Image (spheres, grey):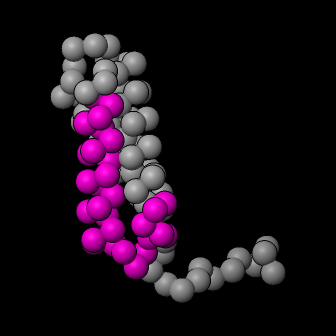
Amino acid sequence: MLWESFGATVLGLVLSWAALRSLSARLPSARAVYATGALGALFGAFLTHSALGPGHGVATLIGAVSVGAVTLSLLIRPRGRRLPRSAAAQ
């Protein structure tokens, strides 16, 4: 489990780096992106390891990358400056 955790953290940081390189204008600060990617991947590894059990290292890392990518996608802001306000908010 220790190596899976280390691998998940490294993969989360690599995902964060790739996201910052390709979508830097639409993401918050780099510190937040790196923290979110690493923690999301660690949570994904924990979740996958808990569901599958020991002995599934590759599947655990795939789960870590999947959950890490999903958590990073939640940080992406819309392209436009501001979203139009709804009538109820006015």
Front residue of 39 and 90: 39
Instruction: Name the residue located 31 percent from the left edge and 17 percent from the top edge.
Output: 52
Percent position (x, y) of residue 3?
25, 27
In the image, the segment drawn in magenta is: 4-32
Q: Residue at x 32, y 13 (%)?
A: 53
The image position of residue 10, as x and y in percent, is 27, 44
Identify whether 74 is placed above or below 67. below
Q: Quadrant of residue 16?
A: bottom left
Q: Which residue is painted at 49% across and 60% down in the image?
A: 32
- Please indicate, yes or no, whether residue 22 appears anywhere in the rendered image: yes
Q: Is residue 67 visible?
A: no
Q: Is residue 5 above or below residue 77?
A: above
Q: Does residue 2 belong to the magenta stretch? A: no
Q: Quadrant of the N terminus?
A: top left
Residue 17 position (above or below residue 60) = below
At 49% across and 84% down in the image, what residue appears?
A: 80
How far across and how far down the image is residue 55, in percent? 21, 14
Residue at the far bottom: name it: 81
